Image: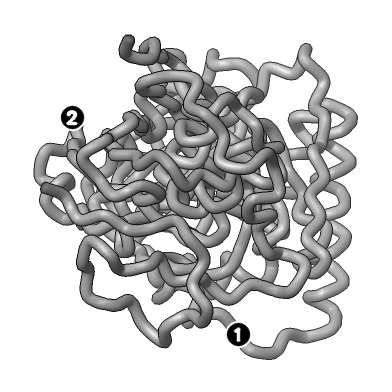
Amino acid sequence: MAAATTASPATAPPSSFPSTTRKSPLPILRLPRKLKLPAASLSSDPSPAFQSVTAFAPATVANLGPGFDFLGCAVADAALSLGDTVTATLDPSLPPGTVAISAVTSPARPHLAARLSRDPLRNCAGIAAAAALRALGVRSHAVSLALAKGLPLGSGLGSSAASAAAAAKAVDALFGSLLSPHDLVLAGLESEKAVSGFHADNIAPAIQGGFVLVRSYDPFTLVQLPCPPALRLCFVLVTPDFEAPTAKMRAALPKKIDIGHHVRNSSQAAALVAAVLQGDAAGIGSAMSSDGIVEPTRAPLIPGMVAVKAAALEAGALGCTISGAGPTAVAVIEGEEKGEEIARRMVDAFWSAGKLKATATIAQLDRAGARVISTSRLLE
């Protein structure tokens, strides 16, 4: 049987993950005071609404160039292959109030499943699901999770956030969809902090969809950026055969920056927000290409990235930058007409300049975020 973790609050968080036993409480991750989950703030011990729920959460592009740690957007393809799927099922064989991971699969990358832990204390989906159970106040039921990974690890596409978002959404829906999007983001943040650092620019758009601005971390405040429906914004995502762990890429960032660089990046981030609100695809692309702090530090760590950006722009992309911590390069276009040619040029540049094989996907702005895609009725 898969290991289980309780969703009940612990009195004090351990300094590291404990060894897993059936009675080990999920560690409470240290968040700023106003970021605490609203544990049991809803009706006490809600009844389940379904026997099982399957939820999908999309890939995300964090930073968007100059918006390091405070801007991000959700992206997906029509087949919903660009994201993760989690099925949450009531499991009477587990102790009440606990979460277990019954299966981890990766249909497109079978080798990936073996690298992901089924220990719910060490899996993004497990941590977020337990946080959602705590927020709901569930004490009389246990949940098992089946995670299907559609995103590669360490790709810069919000892989950990997609697992966390899908799990939190599925658990919430299992008990009647009682949590707000803000509460779901907080549940996902517990997972993000444990595995990739305390930042919400992936988990917020993975939950809410579209473009999201993290206005403040304490107090925690998100701003959804409405983008005109007529804007046909597309993203050419080119991922090389190269992993760029978030922790390593964050460690490479400068500890101090020049005031001039700060002013320029701030103005470009503001310009990006304005372009989103105005539906200005060219403005979005221009601002995304203008990061003068993070991208210049990270690009040399990804073989061929500088040449890939140049190739994208020469082929007609409106803008190009590193997606999240990388190594995926993301180019922005309006409509899909130029997508295949830009993708081909970027893939070729990764090989010619970095000797890295790469795959390309053309995605659209995902305005929905995490959503339920199937349910099964309660057993009689």
The label shown at residue 107 is 2
Q: Secondary structure at mark 2?
A: loop
x and y, in percent, of residue 38 in the image: 69, 54
Nearer mark to the viewer, of 1 and 2: 2
Relative vertical location of residue 156 with respect to residue 149 in this rendering, above or below: below
On screen, residue 72 versus residue 77, left or right, reads right
State the image quarter where residue 227 is shown. top right
The CA distance from mark 1 to mark 2 is 38 Å
Q: Secondary structure at mark 1?
A: loop
Q: Amino acid at mark 1?
A: Pro
Relative vertical location of residue 109 with respect to residue 98 in this rendering, above or below: above
Identify which residue is drawn at 71% across, 74% down. Answer: 32
Mark 2 Cα shell of 10 Å, populated few (<14), some (14-19), many (≥20) = few
State the residue in front, 60 or 119. 119
Q: Amino acid at mark 2?
A: Pro
x and y, in percent, of residue 106 in the image: 20, 36
The label shown at residue 203 is none
Mark 1 Cα shell of 10 Å, populated few (<14), some (14-19), many (≥20) = few
Identify which residue is drawn at 45% across, 21% down. Answer: 77
The label shown at residue 254 is 1
Relative vertical location of residue 246 with respect to residue 329 in this rendering, above or below: below
**Could you tell which of marks 1 and 2 lies nearer the N-terminus?**
2
x and y, in percent, of residue 66 in the image: 71, 59
x and y, in percent, of residue 55 in the image: 44, 26
Which quadrant is the C terminus positioned in? top left
On screen, residue 184 versus residue 25, left or right, reads right
Identify which residue is drawn at 36% across, 32% down. Answer: 88
Identify which residue is drawn at 52% across, 72% down. Answer: 29
